[in-house]
């Protein structure tokens, strides 16, 4: 059985862009603090703090040559690569040197889209055909990173070989090409993922150098672990919040000034338990069809019924070393089941892992997690 265990040490290596050619590595004894996280549909961060006195003069000289976006920070938990991404900032004072970095999605935040976004074809031979939203996301990333007209070479951040997909069963047809059907949307690639594809069911995260383009897990997916209160060191916090609950999710492109000629999409169930509990989402995006709006509603419905009950670990608490899950399995988005029978909220239910927050220093390692409700498999039909 897998077990989280205790990290014996953390190592930090500064690589050249691409994450494979080392530039420098401070001694383990010089690392006074290591912080990193994993998250879903957002960019995670990694930070190391180095004691200059313990690092030595030669290492200190190399630290001073670290260049944001030229170098990357790689973090190893014992021998396992757990986090990697471009350095974004360094901060030095008289006694310490701090390196701050973001995960590899930062490269997508700093690369502007130069390709036409028109994924309407039903021909599989067309490289820009409609299909699973995860496939469309990979195609957008690939077409941009392979373009050499604005970069020093194809795939300059070395990302394409590290994309992992878990495709949805529903096809997406998506365009953002203006009224003339030939305009390029000039925004960062990451904004396209966030604004257009996450709303259609994409879920992305990173583990090490891998960019995972996935889908929201449901109760049909296998659990990576079954946790009890004994697997948490310190307190836990259980929150049942009706603000995000819904039996029906409505999405419309109406606005307050104009309601003629607009459309809507709806997803959910009629519930005798709640009666009726609606959530309305307005979008100002242009060119959306009823199918597009239904897809947005479908993606947003996940985890809203029943009333979501979340579980988090407050600051100062962490997963116990005996927790039956390895660091490799702590991937944001995966299903994890929790049994908490000693609480007023008598829990025994599946969750989705939303965040992993890790700190390592003189007192050892603390691994915090946040869990959010998981949805049932969707059974409704599109309009």
Image: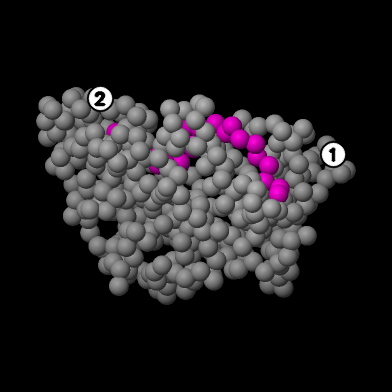
**Residue 61: image location, x then y, percent:** 18, 25
What span is colored magenta in the figure? 99-121
Which residue is identified by label 1? 258
**Residue 158: image location, x then y, percent:** 40, 40
- Is residue 103 inside the magenta stretch? yes
**Residue 97: image location, x then y, percent:** 23, 30
Name the side, left or right, on which 12 lies relative to 101: left
> Pointer 2: residues within 10 angstroms few (<14), some, or many (20+)?
few
> In the rendered image, is residue 276 in sight?
yes
> Pointer 1: residues within 10 angstroms few (<14), some, or many (20+)?
few
**Residue 261: image location, x then y, percent:** 87, 44
| Quarter of the N terminus within the rendering | bottom left
The answer to whether 317 is drawn above or below residue 220 in the figure is above
Q: SS at mark 1?
A: loop
Name the side, left or right, on which 121 lies relative to 212: right
- Is residue 108 inside the magenta stretch? yes
> In the rendered image, is residue 281 in sight?
no
Q: SS at mark 2?
A: loop
Which residue is identified by label 2? 65
The answer to whether 13 is drawn above or below residue 80 in the figure is above
């Amino acid at each position: 059985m897998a077990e989280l265990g205790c990290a014996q040490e953390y190592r930090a290596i500064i690589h050249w862009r691409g994450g494979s050619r080392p530039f420098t590595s401070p001694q383990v004894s010089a690392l006074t603090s290591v912080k990193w996280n994993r998250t879903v549909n957002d960019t995670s961060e990694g930070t190391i703090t180095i004691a200059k006195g313990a690092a030595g003069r030669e290492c200190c000289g190399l630290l001073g040559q670290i260049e944001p976006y030229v170098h990357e920070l790689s973090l190893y938990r014992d021998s396992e690569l757990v986090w990697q991404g471009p350095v974004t900032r360094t901060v030095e004072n008289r006694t310490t040197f701090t390196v701050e970095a973001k995960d590899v999605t930062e490269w997508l935040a700093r690369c502007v889209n130069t390709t036409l976004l028109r994924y309407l074809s039903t021909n599989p031979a067309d490289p820009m055909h409609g299909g699973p939203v995860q496939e469309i996301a990979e195609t957008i990333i690939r077409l941009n990173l392979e373009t050499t007209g604005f970069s020093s070479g194809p795939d300059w951040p070395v990302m394409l070989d590290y994309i992992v997909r878990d495709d949805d069963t529903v096809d997406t047809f998506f365009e953002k090409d203006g009224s003339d059907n030939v305009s390029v949307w000039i925004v960062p690639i990451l904004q396209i993922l966030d604004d257009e594809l996450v709303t259609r069911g994409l879920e992305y995260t990173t583990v090490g150098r891998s960019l995972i383009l996935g889908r929201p897990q449901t109760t049909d997916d296998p659990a990576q672990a079954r946790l009890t209160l004994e697997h948490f060191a310190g307190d836990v916090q259980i929150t049942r919040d009706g603000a995000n609950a819904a039996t029906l999710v409505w999405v419309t492109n109406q606005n307050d000034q104009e309601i003629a000629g607009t459309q809507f999409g709806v997803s959910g169930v009629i519930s005798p338990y709640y009666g009726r509990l609606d959530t309305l989402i307005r979008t100002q995006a242009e060119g959306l069809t009823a199918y597009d709006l239904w897809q947005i509603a479908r993606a947003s419905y996940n985890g809203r019924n029943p009333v979501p009950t979340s579980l988090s670990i407050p600051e100062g608490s962490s997963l116990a070393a005996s927790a039956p899950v390895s660091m490799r399995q702590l991937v944001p988005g995966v299903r994890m089941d929790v049994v908490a029978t000693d609480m007023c909220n008598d829990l025994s239910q599946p969750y989705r892992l939303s965040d992993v927050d890790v700190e390592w220093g003189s007192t050892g390692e603390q691994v915090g997690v946040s869990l959010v409700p998981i949805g049932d498999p969707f059974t409704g039909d599109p309009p």
